[in-house]
Every structure is written in C-alpha cells, then in structure tokens.
Amino acid sequence: MQTIQKAWSQLPRSVILILVAGLAFRSLVAFWLPPGFDEAYYYLYTLHPDWSYFDHPPLVALTTGFGIWLTGTVSPLTIRLGAMLLFTATLYFLYRATTQLFSRRAGVLTLAIASIAPIFQIGFGILTLPDAPLMVFWSLTLWVAACEFFDRDDAPYRPTYRVAVIGLLVGLACLGKYHGVLLGAGLIGFCLTSPAHRSALRSPWTLLSMALFTIAFSPVLYWNWQHDWVSFLFQGNRGIPGRRYRISQVIETAFIHSAYLFPTIGLPLWWVSLSTASRAGRSTVRSWFNPGSHTELSNLRDRQWLVVWLSVPAFLVFILIEGYQQILPTWTMPGFFAATPLLGQQAALWQQRHPKLVQRWLWGSAIATFMLLLTALSHITLGTLQKPSHYGIFGGFLAPENDASIELVDVVQLRHNFAKSPELLAALKNADFIFSNRFHMAGHIGMALTPLAPVPVTCFDKKDLRGFAFWSTADQWLGKTGLYLTSNEFQTNEDSAAEYVPYFQQFEKLGEVLLQRGGVTVNKFHIYRGTNLIKPYPRPQM
C-alpha cells in the first residue's frame, strides 16, 4: 500500500487531474446512458460463468459482473464499473510507458490525447466490452516492454525476467479479446527486426514466456477443446474474404475511423504513425547493414520502432480487411490507442516551439468532444432533439419512429414499469423461462427482469443464437411455460410473436409495457405467455 501511495504522490498534478476528471465524466455518462446491444448480452455472461464463451474470451464476464457483485444492483452504471476502473489503469500504464520511452512531457501529452478521443472514452472506458480488459494489458505490456528493452542506454541489451512477464501479459490480453494476438505478433516483429533486441528471442526467458502465455490463455483453449474449437472457427470466418475487394471502402473507412477519434486527433495520429513508421523503419534497415553504429538518434528510432510494431499493424490489418469484410469501429482502436505515444512525443516537440498552439489544440479538442458527447447523451436520455419532447430544443427535430437511438432500451424503466403490473409480475414469477427473438434483445430483457425474479433467459432465433446455443439445449424447455418479450419494432413490423404460436399448446398476449423519453412514449414491449412448449424450436447450425 505504501508503494502505491508513493507512486501516486510522485505523479504530476496534471496526470492526477486528467485521470480523476476523466473517470468522473465517464461515470456521468455510464450512469445515464442505456446499455447497448452487446453490453446487455454480456450481462448474460455473468449469469452463465464458464471458462470461455462462444464469441469472446471470459474476462468481459468478470468486468461486467464486478459492479453487480460489488453492489448487488443491475443497472447501466454497475455493469460498466469494471470497464471504467480498468480504463483509468490503462491510461496510467500508457502514461508510464510513454514516459519510459520518451519523456515525462510526452507522457502527459499522450495521456491528454488518449483521454480526449471520444471512441477511446466510449469503447474502452464507458461501455462494458471485451476491449476494456484487452487494453489494460495492452498498455501494461507496452510499459513492461519499454522497461525491458530500454532500461539502460549505456549498455548492450540483455534479456531479463521481464520477457517472461510480457508473455503472461499477452496471454491475459488474449483472455480479454482475441485481438491480443496482434500484440504478441507485434512484439515478435519488433525483436526480429531490431538487431539490438533480437537476443530476446533466443533467451531462456522466452521459453518461460511462452509457457506463461499458454497458462494464461488455457481457459479459452480448454473451453474450445470441449466445443470443437467453435470460437476460433467463428472468429476466423469473419476475416475470410467474401466478396470483391474495394479500395474505395478502405479509404472511406480510414476517414470514418479518423472521425471516431475526432478529426483533430485522428488525422494527426494517422500522419505521425505512418511517417514515424517510415523513418524508424528506414533507420532499422540501415542498422542491419551497420550493426556497430549507435547514436542517440538511432536509440530514439528503436523506441519509436517498438511503438510502431505494437500499434500500426493492429489498425492497418483491420482497415485493409474492410476492403472485403465489414469491421466494427472498435477493431482498429487498440492499434490507434497504442500509437498515441508517437503523437504525444511529436506534440512535445511542437510544444517547445509553439506552446500556445498545442494548448489551444488540446483544449479545443477536449471542449468540442465534451460538448458533442453531452449533446448525444442528453438526446438519448431526455430526447432533446426529439419531436415531440418535453425537453426538445426549439421544439425538437427528430421523430421517434425515425430515431435509431430508441433501440437503446432503458432497462431500469422497463423493470419499473413491468413491476407496476401485478398480472405481469405474477406471470414472470410463474414462468419457467423467458425468451426473445434476438440475442441482444434477450440481454436487455434479462437485465430488466432477472432482478425481479431469477427466471432463466434464452433466445429463440433460427439465424443467430450466439452463447445461447451453449447455455441451453433445444429440448430443455419442452413442457415448460415461457414468457416472450419483444420490442415494438419487431412486433409491429414483423408480427414476430406469430412465429412461436405453433410451438406452444397455448400462446396468448398478456399486455404491453410502455417506455417514455422526454415525457413521450417512444417504444413499448409486447409480452406473451406460451404455455407448454410442445416441440423444440429449430436451432441454426453453429
């Protein structure tokens, strides 16, 4: 404890301010923002503890469950508490890594840049996603690697125990998300291409590193061994080319992801990453032919080369995949996040020449992203851009039926309104299971209703079952009574309930639960009861 207090007391005030202010802002957003599709689904992970899961490794279950187990409450804030705290640690490790590689000034600027980019705040620091545990080990690996490879400039590099620690950390990163494989590949790539550090691969510590990696990743290997390696097949198939390659799509994605980072951060990050990769790469190639030469500049290039290997491939790979396969925004972001020390180091140089300009750049970017996020949050929670709405700005602009944000279900309101109906509450407590027609919808329903009654939640969908295929069997619910819930979108547009009528002895509507925003009804959930499931509902081939 004294060591932690000493390390905290030695931090610059600016670092403490950024970390505390960032956590406070993310807590505000996490409290008010309804859970997203994936977040609600990951809540169900916490109800089915296992070594791993069909679509992700197991750490997201722990980070999602942390706040629930700590408080005993299921809410948007509690499922995100683990992710918020992990991102604070992630930022701290990023600061320490950048300081070790470049300078304290570069570390502070890197911390500021990483705290401003909205996609980092949302994808890593607010939403409960597999990226939260992935990034805390990614940034910690960068810090340990910086200490291992650049501990002393006045002596030749000699591998130490940290090589083994790095293997353990990469394994834990993979235990968060499979993208951690790119982190390990980047470290190997750095050692192979850096003559001064190639000895790490020949060290006995590397054997221990591989062993620790395997041990850390063993829960995923064990689960997949039990289930015919289905997770690896599922994730691998998502990267297989399925159509004609389109360069225009790659270019468009690069600009879109710059917007996710915020243009004043994203565009400079692109430029400094690729330009530094080019310069450091040329310097490294020259060192192959003249290994005896060593200058202060070449040492700096080696440090940049490490960051390049742990960042640039990780975002370029997915940007290029977009040419034939749609990717999610968070797939590229670990690479962009790991590249921020390059921009922080460059910003430190700019600050020496133009301090006011750098200050205006960072403050302007921070204020702009803060206002944009608050505007989006106020609309999602209060309907400030909605027409009609009691809180609509200038009367509002966007009709609820044309607003995709209403698909973010206010699970606390759904729970409260559901519990106000004695008939619905009694039906829930007497049901053998709850089901919906989409895996993410089942997640929202689970978050809303399982705190009222611990009834199993499942999904009846012929196309995509995700983890439900492993949490239940097709005939498990035969002869049982199920409560079916779905949103107004599916019931009104598709009459989804009609699909389940032939599978039950009796299928009847019990009622509706209205959801309001800005004092106006924007969505409603339809509740049906199916008595005595007479035949298994068909399942897709996994």
Image: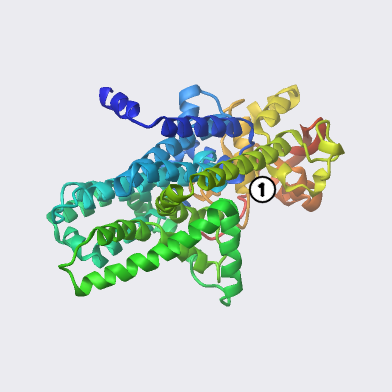
Q: Is residue 201 above or below residue 245?
A: above
Image location of residue 73, percent across then percent down: 55, 25
Q: Provide the secondary structure element on which disc 1 rests.
A: loop
Q: Is residue 213 above or below residue 189?
A: above
Q: Residue at x 64, y 49 (%)?
A: 438
Q: Farthest residue to the front: give it.
A: 353
* Colouring scheme applied when the structure was drawn: rainbow
Q: Is residue 239 above or below residue 362?
A: below
Classify 10 Å Cα crowding around label 1: few (below 14), some (14-19), many (20 and above).
many
**Image side of residue 178 versus residue 127, left or right:** left
Q: Quadrant of the N terminus?
A: top left
Q: Residue at x 68, y 48 (%)?
A: 503
Q: Residue at x 56, y 69 (%)?
A: 250
Seen from the viewer's position, the closer of residues 513 and 116 is: 116
Seen from the viewer's position, the closer of residues 22 and 399 is: 22
Image location of residue 162, percent across then percent down: 21, 47
**Image side of residue 480 versus residue 232, left or right:** right
Q: Residue at x 30, y 64 (%)?
A: 189
- Asked if residue 541 shows in the view, the reply is yes
Q: Quadrant of residue 157?
A: bottom left
Label 1 amino acid?
Asn
Q: Is residue 368 above or below residue 428?
A: below
Image location of residue 153, percent across then percent down: 19, 52
**Image side of residue 113 versus residue 148, left or right:** right
Residue that numbered label 1 is attached to? 437
Seen from the viewer's position, the closer of residues 232 and 34 is: 34
Image location of residue 481, percent across then percent down: 65, 36
How many callouts does the rendering have?
Answer: 1
